[in-house]
Image: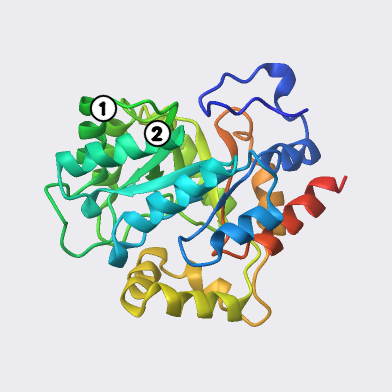
Amino acid sequence: MLRNIDKIGFSVSDSERPVNRSDAVRWLLDHPRYEVVPLPGVREHVLDHLETGSTVPVTSAPARGVEPTIAVAETLAADGYNAVPHLAARSVRGEVHCKEILDRLAEAGVREVFVVGGDNPEPAGPYESGEQLLTTIHRLGHSFADIGVPAYPEGHPLLDDETLWRSLQAKQHDATYLVTQMCFDAKAIGRWVAEARTRGVSLPVLVGIPGVVRRRKLARMSVKIGVGQSARFLRKQSSAIWRLLRPGGYQPTSLVRDLARLPVVGADIRSLHLYTFNQVENTATWVRTLAGQR
């Protein structure tokens, strides 16, 4: 059964929830999100391998500002995709710039954004955190159906856990869902979701996992992004990224099957957010293959 995902915060009826692990795998793969990086050729990757209407988050590129992200999101939205630009707070120059971004996205028909703090060492304007930018977005007014925010099941290299929890508790009043940072441990994700509920964080959860990643392609893309930005990404991901650099690359089949065992799938965990590293063809093929297995 295909689920209505026009709005992430939809209520899920008992009849729609998975009843066994096989159902849970298909549930997770029903409407995954395919995150891409705004680099040359990314539009062709999406057009060639994803169905129109697919949700495609477009990550931010700190060294280049918000423009590449917005431009790719505008193009993909015009192509019929649910483009979700990442708005990095530390790349926004101020309230006027924020309003310009919101107006452009509204004109392009973008229905959803993902608000992050960003990796810029120095902010381009007054916003140092996603929480600050989120407050401004709501004060200025917007037309988005959904706004996502990040979460960190295995912690953050620069922020302690209590700071992260306080931030999520504050953001959930303006956000409609959260996406977990890339994680390879299903049990850790399950524990984190349980703690989130205990702490009063009730947003629907999309689990962030890597797609099918080929080591050589990942290395080439890292060069295109830039050495400094890649280093910051590696620090943020901790040991996770090294799994992607093993000989032969990585595919997340066993991780998805482990996630399907979690009792929170369906009730709290709504879908997967796939970090494709622009390897869209490999990841989309893997999704179709695994979803078709019984």
Front-most of residues 254 and 274: 274
The structure residue drawn at horizontal position 22% and vertical position 53%, both measured from the top left corner, is 90
Task: From the top left corner, tell me how far across and down residue 141 is, in percent.
Answer: 27, 25
The C terminus sits in image quarter? top right
Q: Where is mark 2, residue-wise?
A: 107
Front-most of residues 93 and 147: 93
Instruction: State yes or no: discs 2 and 1 in contact (Cβ < 8 Å).
Output: no
Q: Amino acid at mark 2?
A: Glu
Task: From the top left corner, tell me how far across and down residue 229 is, in percent.
Answer: 34, 71
Task: From the top left corner, tell me how far across and down residue 131 is, in percent.
Answer: 24, 39
The structure residue drawn at horizontal position 69% and vertical position 27%, both measured from the top left corner, is 3
Q: Amino acid at mark 1?
A: His
Q: Where is mark 1, residue-wise?
A: 138
* Residue 115 figure quarter: top left
The structure residue drawn at horizontal position 53% and vertical position 29%, both measured from the top left corner, is 8
Asked if one can make out residue 11 in the rendered structure from this viewpoint, the answer is yes
| Category of crowding for the residue at label 2, using alpha-carbon neighbours closer than 10 angstroms: few (below 14), some (14–19), many (at least 20) | few
Front-most of residues 80 and 210: 80
* Count of all numbered marks drawn on residues in the image: 2
The N terminus sits in image quarter? top right
